[in-house]
Image (spheres, grey):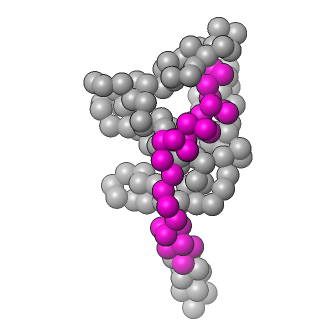
Amino acid sequence: MRYFVTGMIALAGFAGCMAVEMPDAREGRVAYEANCAMCHGPGGRADGPLAGDLSVPPIDLTKLAQEAGGAFPVNRVLSYIDGYKRQAPEAVEMPEFGLLLEGPSVPVETGAGIMTPTPRPLAALLAYLESIQSEI
């Protein structure tokens, strides 16, 4: 019975995030400009004002899909932004933004039709990053 109740609570929470209007790239651009542009540049091309001061240069965010074989790598981007997946600390200077990008959850497809509740600001940032991908 306890598992049933827990499952129903989780399902209700997920259903609640399904009813929320999805963020778009315009909303994500605000999060990008506040958190990313200083290193990755105004257009995501690794040419921000602080890029030259970093011991490890930032990556060109307009080539994420190209480098992933043509599909925007949602899980990879999510894991880097929130700090779940990082190289050794000396190999990257990007701070973890997971705590800065909290908020009500919205569903984000993370592969194979799986919808993952994701903080709205983070989902918006994903939408923006996907919108700036260069043509392959």
Residue 96 point in image, percent of width and height: 68, 36
Q: Is residue 122 above or below residue 17?
A: above
Q: Main secondary structure of the magenta part?
A: helix
Q: Is residue 117 above or below residue 54?
A: below
Residue 35 point in image, percent of width and height: 66, 33
Q: Residue at x 49, y 61 (%)?
A: 21
Q: State the residue lying farthest toward the front.
A: 26
- Residue 15 belongs to the span the image colors magenta: yes
Residue 23 point in image, percent of width and height: 51, 52
How many marks can you see? Answer: 0
For residue 60, side relative to residue 86 (left or right): left
Determine the image quadrant of residue 132: top left
**As rendered, which of 66 and 120 lies closer to the eye?**
120
Q: Which residues are magenta?
A: 12-39
Q: State the residue lying farthest toward the top.
A: 52
Q: Residue at x 71, y 46 (%)?
A: 99
Residue 114 point in image, percent of width and height: 40, 59
**As rendered, which of 1 and 35 lies closer to the eye?**
35
Q: Is residue 88 visible?
A: no
Q: Is residue 34 visible?
A: yes
Q: Residue at x 54, y 86 (%)?
A: 4
Q: State the residue lying farthest toward the bottom.
A: 1
For the N terminus, the quadrant is bottom right
Q: Residue at x 54, y 72 (%)?
A: 16
For the C terminus, the quadrant is top left
For residue 94, side relative to residue 24 (left or right): right
- Residue 130 belongs to the span the image colors magenta: no
